[in-house]
Amino acid sequence: MIREKIRTTVKNVYEGNEKIVTLRTIEASIINFPLYLQFEGKSMNTATTYLNAMALFQEFIKDILANRVRTIDDLRPQTIKLYVRYLTKLCISRKITPSTAELRINSLRVYLRYISKEFDMKDDLSDYLKQIKKGYFNKAANIEIDKTKKILSLDDVKKIISTIENSFDKNSIRDAAIIYTLISTGCRRSELLNLRWCDINLHASTISINREKTSTHSVLNINEYCRNALYQLHEQQIKDKITSYVFRDYKSNRSNNKEIPLSTNALQVLLKKWGEKAGIDFPISAGTFRHSFVTVLLNEKTPYSEIMAYTGHKSTDTLSHYTHLHPNYGKNIQSHLKLDIA
C-alpha cells in the first residue's frame, strides 16, 4: 500500500499533476521531495527508489523516536546518528544488507540537502553523513565483504535473455537488447547508457564506443543476435519518434519530451529483476557481464590484445598491439559468444 502511494506521488510530480505542500512537516517535505529530484535531473525510477528509502526513515521516526520529530526544524544531528545506529542494528540482525543500508543513507543525504536548500536551514545536516562511505555498514556490522567477482556462463546469459523474451513486460525488447549489447561488447555501464543511434551501424553490424574513462574510441563488431535485438529496438523507437539515446527510460521527462539516457539506478534495477526471474543466485550488474565477457574469451584462448580492444583496458605494455590487429579480430571475438537460445 505504501509503495503504491509512493509510485503515485512520484508519477503525479513527473507528469505535472503535483500538489505543492508548503508545511514544514517531515511528511509534507517528503511529498515535495520528487520535485527537487526532478529538477536535479533524476529519473522517475530513481525518485521512486529514494522515496521508498525515505519511507523507512519515517517508520524510524514513528516507531523508534515515538513521533518526537514532526517537522524539519525538529531534526538534529543526534537524529541522524540514531538513524545510522538503527540501520547498523538491522544489518547485524541480517534484516537488511549493508548495501541496502547504504542506499537508505544516500537517499537521506540527498533529502537533507534538499531541505537545507528549499527551507533555508541554518545547518546542512547531510554533513553529518560524510563519514558514511561504501563499506561502512559492513565494517560496523562486522560483515565480511565478498570480493569474489561472480561470473555468468553463456548458459546463464541465454537463460536471462529467454526469460525476457518470453515475458509480457512492456520493456522486453529494450531489456533484451541491453543484455545482448553488454555480453557482446563487454562495455562499461557508462558506455552502454551513453550509446546513441548514430553510434550503431546495423548494416555493418558495428557499434562505436566512446570511452570517456580512457579517452579512447573503438568500433566493434557485434554478432547477429545483438544486431537483431538492436534492430527490433530501433524499429520500436522509430514508431515512438525516438532518435537519440539507444537505451532510455520511456517514463522519464515525458512531459517535456526530452530524450535522456536510462539512469544507472534504473539499469541496475532492471538487471537485478531479470537476474532474479531467471533464477540467477547472485545479484547481477553491468560489471558482471563485462567480467563474464572477458572470462569467456580467456577460456577460449583469445589473445589479450583482441580482448583489450573490446574492453578498452589501457596499458603501456599493450598499446602498441592495438594498431596491428588483424581486420577480422572482431569477428573472431564474436564467434566465441554462442548466444543462440533455440
Image (tube, rainbow, N blue to C red):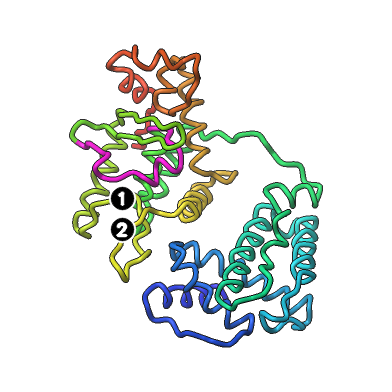
Which SS class for mark 2? Answer: loop
The x, y position of residue 338, in whole percent, is 37, 28
Span of residues in magenta: 185-202
The one of 2 and 304 positioned closer to us in this rendering: 304
Residue 290 in sight here: yes
Relative image position of residue 219 (x, y in whole percent): 30, 29
Q: In the rendered image, which residue does mark 2 sit on?
A: 259
Task: Please indicate whether residue 195 sits to the left or right of residue 41 in the image.
Answer: left
Q: Position of residue 206 (x, y in %)?
A: 27, 32
Image position of 157 (left or right of 221): right
Query: Residue at position x 43%, y 62% from top?
Result: 41
Q: Based on the picture, tell me whether residue 80 belongs to the magenta stretch.
A: no
Disc on res. 31: none
Q: Residues within 10 Å of mark 2 (few under 14, many from 20)?
A: some
Q: Position of residue 137 (x, y in %)?
A: 74, 52
Indicate the quadrant where residue 208 lies: top left
Q: State the residue in front, 130 or 338.
A: 130
The answer to the question of whether label 2 and label 1 lie on touching residues, with beta carbons closer than 8 A, is yes
Disc 1 secondary structure class:
loop
Q: Nearer the viewer, residue 109 or 117?
A: 117
The three-letter amino acid code for the residue at tag 2 is Glu
Side of 281 relative to 11 (left or right): right
Above or below 49: residue 325:
above
The residue identified by callout 1 is 245
Residue drawn at (44%, 29%) of the image: 311
Q: Residues within 10 Å of mark 1 (few under 14, many from 20)?
A: many
Q: Earlier in the sequence, mark 2 or mark 1?
A: 1
- Disc 2 and disc 1: Cα gap in Å? 7 Å
